[in-house]
Image (cartoon, grey):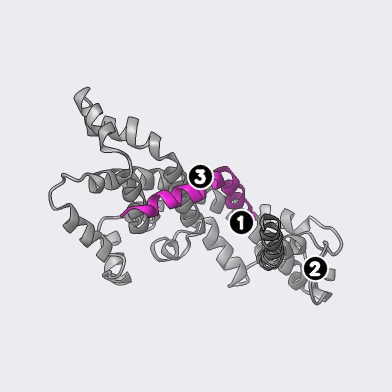
Amino acid sequence: MKKNALLSDKMLDVPIYAILSVMMIITVYPLLYVALASFSDASQLVGHKGLIYKPLGFSLEAYKSVFSNPGIITGYKNTLFILVFGVTVNLVMTSLGAYVLSRRNVMWNKAFMFIIVLTMFFNGGLIPFYLIVKGVGLTNSLWSTILPFSISTFNLIIMRTSFMAIPESLEESAKIDGANHFIILLRIILPLSMPVIAVMILYYAVEKWNGWFYASVFIKDRNLFPLQLTLREILIANSTDSMMEGANAGDRFQIGETIKYATIMVASVPILVLYPFVQKYFVKGVMVGALKG
């Protein structure tokens, strides 16, 4: 019976692995296509139709053009500023909020939680939001993409639930030893919640790295544009002329296509590199934050 059960399990694994392999190929190939196209020769790429399995005439001209564009370098600097300071503010504010909401003896705890959750379904709209940001003097500043987004309600709920799963006895023991709330949070709660912290870093980092909409609303100075806003101009507005100085009119279209692919890779690779370092915490952190409400 055991041998038959093992054989049936293995037979069932075959179609499962086959389906997962097909899904993986469907998911990975678009990125692989962009990577191969970015290293391809412009004239061969434009003349090619169908799938690509290798670079069509290896060339680094697109990457040279991308990194020679001052807008890309400036966008990288602005995005790194938003990423570093934004994620720091997010983690500090979310941790403080989650700690307060996870304490069972806080007055009106459930009422506060209800109001916070309500913001996930209703908001004042873009115009009142813009007027508030403008009223406090944050427009045309990189801080306009950081401070108004200090806390994500979804992430706050995950972190709060994780904090609630930590035994109360640890907090009581710390209080007996004279620890205040800040010491409890910094020396007990946060060290025991590192998987969730890693997930929060990934969530917030991806959000900051990919953000462009609110930057386009609040920022008008091109020297303050984040990378994704510059990328949007290149891909949608087709503004690749500044990267093709010296090219004749016939070559501009061809070179412009490879530049777009190279720009996508330049903007995507850094956040893809971050994921493997937090992947081992990812599933554990999300599950811890989702088990107990």
Give the mark, 3 or 1, whose residue is nearer the N terminus: 1
Distance between the Cα atoms at labels 3 and 1? 22 Å
Residue at label 1? 268
**Label 3 vs label 1, nearer the camera:** 3
Distance (Cα) linking label 2 and label 1: 20 Å
Q: Secondary structure at mark 2?
A: loop
Residue 236 as seen in the image, left or right of residue 65: left
**Which amino acid, mark 1?**
Ser
Dot 3 crowding, Cα within 10 Å, few <14, some 14–19, many 20+: some
Q: Which residue is mark 3?
A: 281
Q: Residue furthest left?
A: 107
Residue indicated by mark 2: 52
In the image, residue 182 sits, relative to residue 212, either above or below, namely above
Q: Is residue 105 left or right of residue 150?
A: left
Q: Amino acid at mark 3?
A: Tyr
Query: 226 or 278: nearer the eye?
Result: 278
Whether residue 136 is in magenta: the answer is no
Q: Residue at x 82, y 61 (%)?
A: 55
Among all residues in the image, which is located at the extreme right?
57
Foreground tag (2 vs 1): 2
Secondary structure state at the residue bearing disc 3: helix
Quadrant assignment for the C terminus: bottom left
Q: How many discs appear?
A: 3
Image coordinates for residue 101, horizontal then vertical, percent: 24, 49
The secondary structure that most of the magenta stretch takes on is helix
For residue 46, above or below residue 31? below
Residue range highlighted in magenta: 266-293
Q: Which mark is residue 248?
A: none
* Amino acid at dot 2: Ile
